[in-house]
Amino acid sequence: MFNKITLGPITIYMYGLMIAIGFASALFLCNYRGKKRGLSEDTIFGIFLCALIGGMVGCRLLYYIVELPAIMEDPSILWDFKNGYVVYGGIIGGIVTSYVYCRIKKENFISYFDLVMPAVSMAQGFGRIGCFCAGCCYGRETHAWYGITFTHSNFAPNGVSLIPTQLISSAGDFLICGVLLWYASKNPKPGRVAAGYLVLYGVGRFLIEFLRNDYRGSIGIFSTSQIISFGIVALGIVLYFVIPKISEKK
């Protein structure tokens, strides 16, 4: 797997490139769909900017929470910014900051919440391709035909055939995006597209965790991400029924 492209004195890392492609594609998709729904392009851009900042902070904060015992023993972990980012923290941080932004702008958060989440799933699909190129978020050892062997990864064990969990996750994220876009075209009640994302992503993440082999922390037999998945799916189910009722009352 190649993790970078070198053009003379310029080096482009595939992980960062895929993140950038995902962000740009998601923003384009939201603007395209937002215009059809009469939503503000400026608000969409503001949400993306806030979600980017909130997501980065959330990724790091959740990592600190998960790794608190290790940090107590070695505080230098706090300053190691090369590693230590938890996707769920990014999702939570991005949603919270977007909500605050919409409240400040006096915009209807639910309308933008439904608009943005399919695009978020698409961005995650590109991000997981970046993970594949870098070798992070790798899977368990396998001797099956679909196994992937890394040779120059700084994360995955090199020379060992592994389950390509990054590509499986990527395919799942793109599939979720497609399902949500289809569901959105049916004009469901407010909040249900976003709630659908939480349920689908939570279930998918819970299942893929059984195939991963990188360290992610654990509580009993479940990884930390699987424990969070329980909460995310439960929240999605609750929001699926609650948000439409709140919107009807308003």
Image (cartoon, helix red, strand yellow):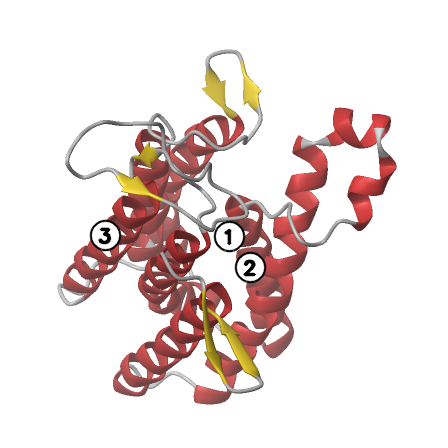
Q: Is residue 75 left or right of residue 206?
A: right
Residue at 60% from the left image edge and 78% from the top image edge? 105
Q: CA distance from mark 3 to mark 1?
A: 19 Å
Q: Quadrant of residue 240?
A: top left
Query: What residue is shown with label 2?
Result: 94
Q: Residues within 10 Å of mark 1 (few under 14, many from 20)?
A: many
The reply to whether discs 1 and 2 touch (Cβ–Cβ < 8 Å) is yes
Q: The residue tagged with tag 2: helix, strand or loop?
A: helix
Q: CA distance from mark 2 to mark 3?
A: 22 Å
User: Which percent across, then down, holds residue 18?
Assistant: 41, 68
Q: CA distance from mark 1 to mark 2?
A: 5 Å
Assign the C terminus to one quadrant of the image.
bottom left
Query: What residue is shown with label 3?
Result: 171
Residue at 43% from the left image edge and 53% from the top image edge? 131
Q: Is residue 168 left or right of residue 102?
A: left
The foreground one among 57 and 242 is 57
Q: The residue tagged with tag 3: helix, strand or loop?
A: helix
User: Which percent across, then down, holds residue 17?
Assistant: 45, 72
Mark sitting on residue 91:
1
In the orientation shown, which residue stands out farthest toward the top?
220
Q: Is residue 213 left or right of residue 60?
A: left
Disc 2 residue type?
Answer: Gly
Disc 3 residue type?
Answer: Ala
Residue at 30% from the left image edge and 38% from the top image edge? 204
Q: Residues within 10 Å of mark 3 (few under 14, many from 20)?
A: some
Mark sitting on residue 123:
none
The foreground one among 105 and 95 is 95
